[in-house]
Image (cartoon, rainbow, N blue to C red):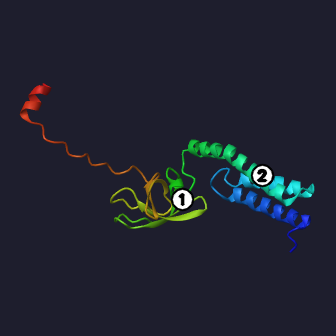
Amino acid sequence: MDWESPDTWRWVWLVVTVVFALGELVTPAAFFFLPFAAGAFLALVLAFLGVGVGWEFTAFLAVSGASFAFLWPIGRRMERRSGRSGVGSNRWVGRQGVVLSDIPAEVGGTGLIRLEREQWRAESGVAGAPIRKGTTVLVSRVHGTRLVVLPLDDGPLPPIEPQSAPPVTDSEQGAQQ
């Protein structure tokens, strides 16, 4: 491969532009690869105009850096406004899913749920209450590699036991009257 040839660099910049643009489409972080795609695109245009490789690299670095400095804060603000974590299993907290296999009542017992197109192991967030197949559930939190879910359409949740309050002494009782 002749690295001095302008035709070679046209192809290199075209491939780099496409790779970064596709990377932007498949990553959850907003505007992470887009600045590099913009820099590579400008270098591609310069390559077709016959500018030297050194200037192409300089343009790539300058436009990528400037675009990154401009777009990255916008992407971070967009992620914060969405109210959800865009990465990892925490993105499912607050989302609804459907139980694919029964979730047993015992502690640590897991079943299978579907969230959008993904399947996850899940455990019941209600002590002593199994969750049956077909039930719509709400993901309340993530516990290790499992999601903790609460049933939404399986009837009312069992009552929550109130925590015992400290006993009231005679002097406190007289003060309240």
The 10 Å Cα crowd at callout 1, few under 14, some 14 to 19, many 20 or more, is few
Label 1's element?
A: loop
Location of residue 34 in the rendering, given as x and y in whole percent from the top left corner: 72, 52
Q: In this figure, which residue is indicated by the disc labeled 2?
A: 38
Residue at point 20% right, 45% down? 164
Residue at (65, 50) in percent of width and height: 30
Residue type beneath disc 2: Ala
Quarter of the image that includes the N terminus: bottom right
Q: Is residue 29 visible?
A: yes
Mark 1 or mark 2, which is nearer to you? 2
Quarter of the figure with the C terminus: top left
In this view, the residue in front, 146 or 70, is 70
What amino acid type should be assigned to the residue bearing mark 1?
Gly
Q: Which disc number belongs to residue 88?
A: 1
Q: Going by the image, does 44 lie left or right of 177?
A: right
| Label 2 element class | helix
Q: Position of residue 133 (x, y in %)?
A: 48, 63
Of all residues shown, which one is farthest toward the left? Answer: 170
